[in-house]
Amino acid sequence: MTKKNILHIFLISLLILLSLSIVNATETNTQTKNMETHTITTQESPIQQSTDDIQSQQINNPKIKKTIETTSNQLTETSKNNHSTKNLKSKNSYIINNTNYDDYFDEDGFVLDNTLSHSTVTLTGEFKNKTFYIDTVPFNITGKNALLHDSTINIQLPSIKISNITFNNTNKNSAIVIEKENTIIENCNITYNTTNDVKAIYITGNNSTIINNNIHVGGPSDEIDWYSDPDLARTLSIAITSNNNKVLYNNITTYSTISKIPYGAIESITIQGAIHGDKAENNTVEYNNIITTGHDYVYGINLGQNINNNKINYNNITSHGLAFADSIQIFSAASNIQITYNNISSISQNISDGIAISKDNMVGETRNNTILFNRIEVDGNYSTAMDIGNIKDSQINHNKISITGQNINGIIIINGKNNTIHKNNIKLNSLKNEDVGILLKESTDNQITTNIILTNTTHTITLLGSNNNTIVNNTLISKRKAGDISINTTNTINTLDNNNHFKTRILLNNITTYRDMKVNLTCQVLDETNKTVHGGKVVLKINGKTLKDDNGNIIYLRVENGVAQLSNYTIPENWRKSEYTLTAVYGGYQHYLSNTNNSTITLLKENVTLTYTSQTTFKSNETIKLSVNVTHDNKTVNTGHVIFKINKKTLKDPSGNIIYATVENGIATITYTLPPMSSKIYNLTVVYGDSIYERCELNSKITIVN
């Protein structure tokens, strides 16, 4: 072997030895790092502390009581290319603070290695300008007194839970971004105060649950981002562009910090699919308190494109906007939308809507929607409780609407067909006579039934270019008209029937008096708007017996200026009960319905006067008579009983029974045989009792001689 070959072999051997040394050193460092004290405990339970069987909570609505079930949120074994294999159990929990953050995440927020895989990460203390990407290995994040300033959690793997974190952001666009399915965000506090675009929680993945969070977002009132798809507002508390998500039991407040353009917009919640492609369907927004306030255009909940089959139920929604306020807007055509049991308040100095659906007559079908049992209050110069276009086969029932303003309407239906508008209570207080409770434009085959519409305007319902609609069994009262004549049907053909009957109520006061006294039996008859009823008759009954005159004829009382009265009715002296039921029966008149009400006549006990009239000296063993006169207001009393006592002992007959003297014509007398008695003066006590007079006692003296 030449020297040259020997040198080559030596160099190769040296390189191999160096390589082995490096490998050993790397393994040693890795093992050392994995043994650091950041590993707290080993668990056998599933990593995901799921919110299965979350118990119900209530907001200010008595109907809100419901158990919410959320998907069990166990982490799955994942890789970057495959995110759905078997469920795994947690092995480790880690506590991460601002000091050791760099041990697990790089400067951009990506995990350094697989250390955190299938673990629970507990954040403690304050973090500033940090990002947490969950993208290559799955782990849950919870907080223990954790406060994240200008930080973001970005979820790019399925089945992740984020809980108990507080965010305070000004510069980050989002606090939480959800890009994959089955995420739970629970018990987090998110606060924004910024002049930059913000989507506090941005959901593009499906089947996520946002529950029991406090979200307080202040951002710019700015132009909608019309160049994106979907076109989102630039200030949003929650943005959903996906399907089957739930937003439950959250407190959400959104407000504008600055107006960047005239008539900019902010929204608390938006649900939007893409104009061409992706949908945002089957989402649920329930049991939330949502408050939105701003300088310009303000929306509580906005639904954009491709948003069928969404539910908005049991929420308190308040929207205040200087230029425009809309508590629930469904911008495009939509079907199978459910809006029920919400408390809605929309207030603006200009334009205000409670619920608007396809208001701008967007292309497409708006069908099979349900709007039930909502309480809607709207105040604004140009305002509508419901403004709906192109709606078909839908129900608008049992809603209570109160609306105030200058150019206002209760419910507007444009190009509607085959809808049911049933049992709504609509009250309109307008400065313009043309405003109405229900306005149909170019609409056919709709059923308007059993509604109560009260307006201070000329008409209750107006039909413009609308035919073949049925309007029956409604209570319709306008400023000067009622019933069918309050409906404006100019140049249309529709069915109107039985809209002329108005409910009445009777006010009947309780009476407290004495027997043999004269009283006025008075009742007041009002309609359901508390206006006095003119016309009709009232019959009075006492304990079910109709009052009649001296000739045996029923007494009919005419209702004049809302009052019916029987004057100077004498309470019979022989009424023995302490209470009697007075019933007033109004028989109805023209468009006023009959009604009945009861009150109570309470009779007080009066006092009597006892006067002893017998002699005062008697002999022992003598049969004597003892008498008293019983009077009331110098009138004889003809009811009650009297007993006598001598020295506090009640007088009895030979059989030992108490001797009662019945009062007749104002006199009560007994006959009694005195036993052998000592000669002296005795106390005589006379006691009167009755159900209609007060108990009375008289003390006197008698003398016994032998």
Image: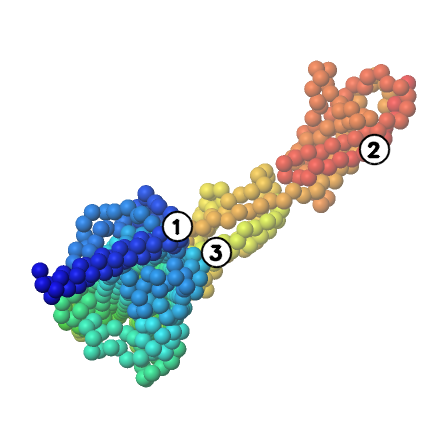
Going from the N terminus, do you reach mark 1 or mark 3 first? 1
Pick the front one: 527 or 125: 125
Q: Identify the residue at horizontal 18%, vertical 69% (top origin).
A: 274
Instruction: Give the SS element for disc 2.
Output: strand
Pick the front one: 515 or 370: 370
For discs 1 and 3, the disc positioned in front in the rendered view: 1
Residue 399 horizontal/vertical position (percent): 32, 60
Please rate how many residues cluster around mark 1, counting C-alpha atoms within 10 Å: few if below 14, some from 14 to 19, many from 20: few
The amino acid pointed to by label 3 is Leu
Instruction: Give the SS element for disc 1.
Output: strand
Q: Is residue 581 above or below residue 102?
A: above
Tell me if label 3 and label 2 are in contact, CB under 8 Å: no
Quadrant (top left/top right/bottom left/bottom right) for the C terminus: top right
Q: Which residue is under mark 2?
A: 700
Label number found at residue 40: 1
Q: CA distance from mark 1 to mark 2?
A: 99 Å
Please rate how many residues cluster around mark 3, counting C-alpha atoms within 10 Å: few if below 14, some from 14 to 19, many from 20: some
The amino acid pointed to by label 1 is Ile
Residue 560 horizontal/vertical position (percent): 45, 62
Relative to 141, 364 lies left or right: left
Please rate how many residues cluster around mark 2, counting C-alpha atoms within 10 Å: few if below 14, some from 14 to 19, many from 20: few
Q: Is residue 295 above or below residue 478?
A: below
Q: CA distance from mark 3 to mark 2?
A: 52 Å
Q: Do we see residue 629 in this rendering?
A: yes
- In the displayed orientation, state which residue is furthest to the left: 1
